[in-house]
Image: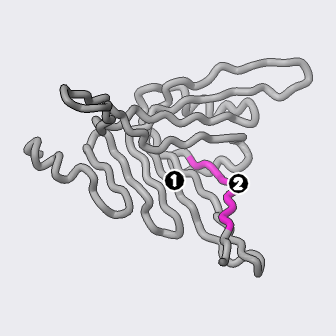
Amino acid sequence: MNIQVNSLTNANVYIDGVGLLGRAEEIEIPQPRHRMIDYKGLGMAGTAELWSGVDKLEARIRWSSFDPQTLTVAASPFQTHSFQVRGSLEQYTSQGRSAELPVVYLMTGVFKDAGVSSFKQQAMVETQSIVSVYHCELYVAGTQIYLYDVFANVYVVGGVDQLSQFRVNLGG
């Protein structure tokens, strides 16, 4: 049995095409989280959960320093921004590193919270921003894993449009 280990340990964040190398300490990227409803009916021995949509998406960015440029970008809740998170996925086997693959996460959204700065003696000022995400896509080695867009009513997983019949049924 051959085991392959995938290791993704670092990334860079871009906002509107501008690289922020070293400015972000951590980013939590959202992926579609399914909203479920309970269904129970007379004669059923149990309760079933049924898909009813996708929850709102939020990303969180913890900044590594007090950066006026990113704070300015994050200040307006009316300006939509394009975000890109790029990483290098290393694959290992018993023979060592066997491949390095690009991982690209794309999202579009608005800053919901520019972040409150926390001041401490002899410590870097910490700030965290929250982004309300409307569109997101994940690619590994150029292959789309998923795409979700709340306003276009599009949800594609592994190349299959999960909502195509839903859009047809609604007339759009």
Q: Which residue is mark 1?
A: 105
**How would you classify the magenta stretch by its main secondary structure?**
strand
Question: Where residue 139 sits: x, y (%)?
Answer: 48, 61
**Secondary element at tag 1:** strand
Amino acid type of the residue that numbered disc 1 sits on in the rendered structure = Tyr
Q: Nearer the viewer, residue 140 or 52?
A: 52
Q: Nearer the viewer, residue 66 or 171?
A: 171
Q: Residue furthest right?
A: 122
Instruction: Return the disc, 1 or 2, that comes first in the chain's sequence.
Output: 2
Disc 2 crowd rating (10 Å Cα; few below 14, some 14-19, many 20+) is few
**Secondary element at tag 2:** loop
Q: Is residue 11 magenta?
A: yes
Q: Is residue 55 magenta?
A: no
| Residue at x 20%, y 53% (from the top left corner) | 164
Residue 10 disc label: 2
Which residues fall within the magenta stretch? 5-14
| Residue at x 66%, y 53% (from the top left corner) | 11
Find out whether the residues at labels 1 and 2 contact each other: C-beta distance under 8 Å: no
Q: In this figure, what is the number of numbered marks?
A: 2
Amino acid type of the residue that numbered disc 2 sits on in the rendered structure = Asn
